[in-house]
């Protein structure tokens, strides 16, 4: 793995305008690093109305994808049924509520962006968390330590690679508030590229764990709010790539290098092919074996997620 100094030196040596100390301060403030030359500089853009329309049209898929990442057993047809206002039998109420929370927070994000009220700030972040983690997190809608619970510090299981523990929960959350304020200010001052700023905030929120639970979900909503505000389509992590997502997140937690995770998010963008054409030299995320899928009862072939309805694939044994 390249050292933080090597990453910064590489960027600086290519005549970027910011001083080397500026990038070091950015990485130190956020708690992780990345190769800034691996981030696309040219991104297709559209009107705010168009990107919000697409997000609205894809809402059931976005909700289902997010649910799968959380281990929710609802199928795509069941998610669509539930969002149409019809309850689904045989499912736990907690699983149903998680899907409804994802849908409600998605609609709240759409309203914020459509009305040009979305901001990269604590108020917006907390309002999204209050919806997406309602009745699931220990407390929701405020940072760890700002409510009744002031002792418990959540951690993340990393399998054979141990556990990741963030800053301790403290009464009043003074340290977490400082970390958040400094991180947001550093992103706004030093990262003008909206895709880079959006993915960096997603990983910033996921790493620092400002809330007891639901950090990745709330941080992805913030990421998509940043993107859509800039006329860039929102990103959903496809359900069939959940294992890859989890693997890259473990690498991120252990290495504090976001380069590959940012490349993975880019690979999930709906306009990734066009982005690669506009940014020659970008490399696809590598390091995991390619997963092949095929239609049930049909000849084996590689299948793209967009071309086939969810639920019609199964993983090939290797």
Image (spheres, rainbow, N blue to C red):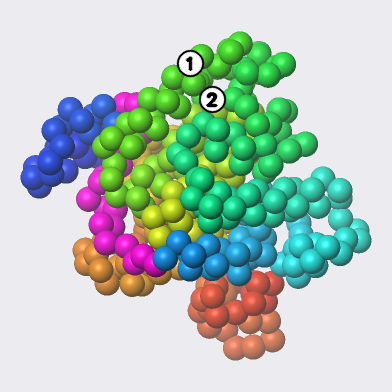
Q: Secondary structure at mark 2?
A: loop
Q: CA distance from mark 1 to mark 2?
A: 15 Å
Q: Secondary structure at mark 1?
A: helix
Q: Residue at x 41, y 47 (%)?
A: 198
Residue 210's place in the image compared with 280, above or below, is: above
Q: Is residue 158 visible?
A: no
Residue underneath mark 1? 175
Q: Residues within 10 Å of mark 2 (few under 14, many from 20)?
A: some
Residue 165 is labelled as 2
Q: Residue at x 8, y 45 (%)?
A: 15
Q: Is residue 280 visible?
A: yes
Location of residue 128 by image quarter:
top right
Residue numbers of the magenta segment: 28-46
Let me know if residue 36 is in the magenta part. yes
Residue 184's place in the image compared with 316, above or below, is: above
Q: Nearer the viewer, residue 282 or 144?
A: 144
Query: Looking at the figure, which quarter contains the N terminus?
Result: top left
Left or right: 212 in relation to 248: right
Residue 299 is labelled as none
Query: Looking at the figure, which quarter contains the C terminus?
Result: bottom right
Q: Residue at x 71, y 28 (%)?
A: 139
């Amino acid at each position: 793995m390249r050292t933080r100094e090597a990453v910064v030196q590489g960027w600086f040596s290519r005549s970027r305008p910011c001083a080397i100390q500026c990038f070091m301060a950015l990485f130190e403030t956020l708690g992780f690093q990345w190769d800034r030359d691996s981030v696309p500089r040219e991104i297709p853009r559209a009107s705010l109305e168009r990107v919000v329309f697409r997000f609205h049209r894809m809402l059931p898929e976005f909700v289902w994808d997010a649910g799968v990442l959380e281990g929710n057993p609802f199928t795509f047809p069941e998610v669509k049924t539930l969002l149409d206002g019809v309850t689904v039998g045989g499912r736990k109420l907690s699983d149903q509520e998680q899907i409804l929370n994802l849908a409600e927070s998605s609609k709240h994000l759409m309203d914020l962006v459509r009305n040009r009220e979305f901001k990269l700030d604590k108020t917006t972040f907390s309002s999204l968390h209050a919806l997406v983690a309602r009745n699931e997190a220990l407390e929701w809608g405020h940072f760890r330590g700002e409510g009744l619970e002031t002792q418990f510090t959540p951690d993340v299981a990393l399998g054979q690679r141990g556990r990741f523990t963030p800053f301790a929960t403290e009464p009043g959350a003074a340290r977490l508030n400082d970390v958040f304020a400094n991180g947001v200010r550093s992103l706004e001052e030093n990262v003008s590229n909206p895709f880079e700023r959006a993915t960096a905030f997603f990983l910033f929120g996921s790493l620092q764990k400002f809330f007891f639970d639901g950090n990745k979900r709330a941080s992805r909503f913030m990421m998509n709010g940043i993107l859509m505000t800039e006329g860039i389509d929102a990103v959903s992590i496809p359900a069939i790539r959940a294992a890859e997502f989890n693997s890259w997140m473990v690498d991120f937690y252990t290495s504090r290098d976001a380069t590959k995770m940012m490349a993975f998010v880019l690979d999930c963008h709906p306009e990734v092919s066009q982005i690669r054409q506009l940014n020659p030299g970008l490399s696809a995320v590598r390091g995991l074996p390619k997963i092949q899928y095929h239609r049930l009862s049909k000849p084996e072939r590689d299948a793209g997620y967009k071309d086939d309805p969810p639920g019609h694939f199964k993983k090939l044994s290797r």
